Amino acid sequence: MKQYLQYRAGASILPILRDEGLRRERIKVFAAPAGGPKWFASVGFDRALMSSGLLGDSDGRVLLVGASAGAWRCLAMACADPPSAYEKLRIAYSRNVFTAEHTSESIAAALKSNVDDFISDSDIPFILNHPHLDVAIHVVKSRGPAGSERTWVQAGALAAAFVLNAVSRHGMALFFERVVFYSGPHEPLFVRNSFRGSSVRLDLNNLRQAALATGCIPYVVAGVPEIPAAPPGRYRDGGMVDYHINQDYSAGPDGITLFFHHQRRIVPGWFDKHLSWRKPPGGSLDNVLQVYPGPEFVALLPGGRIPDRTDFTTFVHDPVERIRRWDEVSQLSGILGEEFLEAVESGKIRGLIQPMGETPGSTSEG
């Protein structure tokens, strides 16, 4: 039987996982990366996670944290009917059709419709008062020229940010300020411990706007100009600074951050994907269990690749084919969910986990 999943664990939890396997009570955080349509490879895993009860119960809270499409996955999982909300998100996102005639404003309107499609009015109070799940949504507040909606001004700001980020990751702070919107009884532990930015509690008036803002890619999608209860400014995609993992989300020395990723490499910020040497901050992966598809699974997919945002332009004249491919990836990803649950329930996962940084093989990365 082929093994399609690969597993890596940080130094703090590797011996625990090898000794006792993956136990529900140790999962304290579920982290979902940004990455556009790459998330379709995670559909089967997410569905398995929702059906398994691994994400906590009333005896212990679990934080769902992410940016962009990752944040949308988290929000869907926290809705009153998670499988239904998640499928509405999958359908709404995959059926978007964009052409050269679309503007940043019309794309923003389409994404707002996506958010409205999978989060109902009754879901908002449910998310805010969830019995055992808390949500944290990464966004950024634009600074200076990065806050302009003029295309040429944004282009210049992004070019400058790219150059300064290559010199130092702190260069991004000149253009984008971290903000995290959160639910739950307390501010997330990572915000209190190490987060360099501001935090805003989610409420009935700002949840939809925060959800939209986290998907507003600069230059492509118009930002959200004001969000209730948040500092004045224009808000955009949190993946600009917190792309895959760029924070220490750990909650205690033996708490596990479960992280399904579309690839092996973990990239801290959006511009860092072009910098092969750039890695997440030291210690931020010590409590992470990373699960990701190996090359044998990727070979099964249409074109032998994980979907990405370029598919919108590649299939601009044939959106039906793009949608067909994304649906096929979603369907095939069910293999991964089944394999993961079998490995957990049988205890086989104990022998499959490798140290972070030592797993052989990879998929196309970006």
Image (spheres, rainbow, N blue to C red):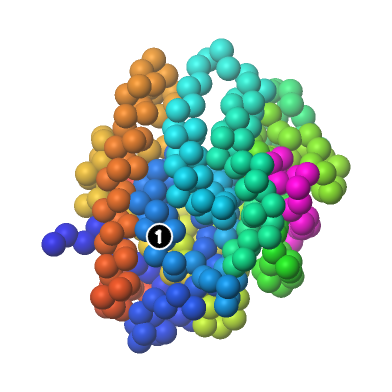
Counting every numbered tag in the picture gives 1
Please state if 364 lies on the left or on the right of 65 as rendered. left
Q: Tell me where residue 357 appears, x and y as whole percent.
A: 39, 68
Dot 1 corresponds to which residue? 51
Q: Nearer the viewer, residue 301 or 177?
A: 301
Q: Residue at x 32, y 24 (%)?
A: 321
Please state if 137 lies on the left or on the right of 114 as rendered. right
Q: From this viewpoint, is residue 361 visible?
A: no
Give, as a single range, the part of the protein colored magenta.
196-211
Q: Tell me where residue 269 appears, x and y as whole percent.
A: 58, 51
Q: Residue lying furthest front in this view?
A: 122
In the displayed structure, 93 sits above or below 49; it is above
Label 1 packing within 10 angstroms: few (<14), some (14-19), many (20+): few
Q: Residue at x 50, y 73 (%)?
A: 27
In the displayed structure, 110 sits above or below 37; it is above
Please state if 247 lies on the left or on the right of 295 as rendered. right
The quarter holding residue 3 reads bottom left
Q: Tell me where residue 313 appears, x and y as whole percent.
A: 44, 23
Can you say which quadrant of the picture contains the N terminus? bottom left
The quarter holding residue 111 reads top right
Q: From this viewpoint, is residue 227 visible?
A: yes
Q: Nearer the viewer, residue 105 or 125?
A: 125
Q: Which element carries disc 1, helix, strand or loop?
A: helix
Q: Tell me where residue 315 appears, x and y as whole percent.
A: 38, 22
Q: Amino acid at mark 1?
A: Ser
Instruction: Specify whether residue 288 is painted magenta.
Output: no
Q: Residue at x 40, y 54 (%)?
A: 47
Q: Residue at x 44, y 68 (%)?
A: 54
Q: Residue lying furthest top in this view?
A: 101
